Amino acid sequence: MGLAYTADIIALPFVYSTAYMSKFKTVDKRSIFMGTMPTSPLTMVRDGLRQKGYKVDYIVHRAPSHQTNITYDTPTKIMFLPSYIRDYLIFVKATWNYHIFIMPFLDRILDRHPILRWYELPTLKRIGKKIILNSYGYDVMTPKKTLDTKNYKHSILEGYEKSPRYSKVNEEYIAKNRAYCERYADHIISALDQAEYLSRIDSRFHMRCVDTEAIIPKYKTGNKIVRIIHATNHTDLKGTEYLIKAVKELKNEGEKIELVFIEKQSRDKVLEAIANADIVADQFIIGAYGNFAIEGMAYGKPVLCYLRENLKQWNPWWNECPIVNTTPEELKQNIKILTHSKQMRIKIGKQSREYVEKYHLVDYVVSRLVNIIKEVDK
């Protein structure tokens, strides 16, 4: 941490003064910086904005190794530099080339810097930039601070307490950073379970989308044994243990079920696995669905997932959601029902596809975002 503080102290005059000088440069009002958290759905949002005439670059600190077919716009010429120097250059260049900044609460350009992180957003505001923040998950979540007194039977707090990784999360910093971001943002986009942690939301939707032209629904698989697919990233947060237990008990009772796990696979491999599955199992303690469930619905699969009732106030479109709402206690029974009824799986799968085409289509998300961009830049 000492080196990081020293680097920030040395860099601060250069970064701040150079960024401030960009105020006197004319920048295209349709130029957009996106970053720096790598997530494949946002590349589709970027491409959709480009089709509408915006100049957009999606720059990330580092793309995950399994995202081999995802293209970001990070300048390759500076990738050899140490990350803390690279961040300074990306920030300065961004102030000179973009008018609108679309970022998450954490994993912003300078979020990893102990001093400059607190100068990042006010500097952008002072030089006339527009800031749109889109929460994605743990960037705003403080389960131990927020949910400890809620007495929910199941919530992400259960996973935070079990996980070696998340039990050490500094929620004091996340809460402080969240308040800082809410103060300086021109517009905040959030929904799902993340809305429960925010004191300010300007647009209630989420930029999670799929390309329905590329994803062709596959309502029938021809599998001789019903195949359930589950992504094992963040297992403690998803309640994977409950799924394993339910399937094991059903198998012991003579049910013919195949449980397939997906982890750290390329997007093409994940989509192929979903297409060949009969049932998609998302999560069972968080209370909201994620990208995996959306992709499953896009392929016309019935999705098992826990949707917490009180979260519907921030997600009213859930009233139309065909997800089979499933707590850990209901997992065994719901799996059994779907396993025994191919007709029900197909029916729910078709409803799922229709739901995605209404609420998670790329054009839908991009159109809503364009309206927000126009609103903040009046």
Image (cartoon, rainbow, N blue to C red):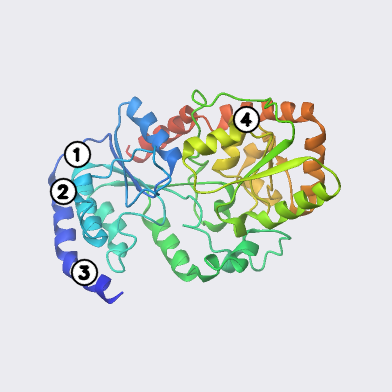
Tell me the quadrant of the picture where the C terminus can be found.
top left
Q: Secondary structure at mark 4?
A: helix
Residue position for label 3: 7
Residue at (85, 44) in percent of width and height:
254
Upstream in sequence: badge 3 or badge 1? 3
Tell me the quadrant of the picture where the N terminus can be found.
bottom left
Front position among marks 3 and 1: 3
Front position among marks 1 and 4: 4
Task: Say few, some or many: other residues with alpha carbon within 10 Å of mark 4 (under 14 / 14 to 19 / 20 or more).
Answer: many
Q: Amino acid at mark 2?
A: Ser
Residue position for label 2: 22
Upstream in sequence: badge 4 or badge 2? 2
Residue position for label 1: 27
Residue at (44, 60) in percent of width and height:
178
Q: Are marks 2 and 1 in contact (CB under 8 Å)?
A: yes
Front position among marks 4 and 2: 4
Residue 355 tag number: 4
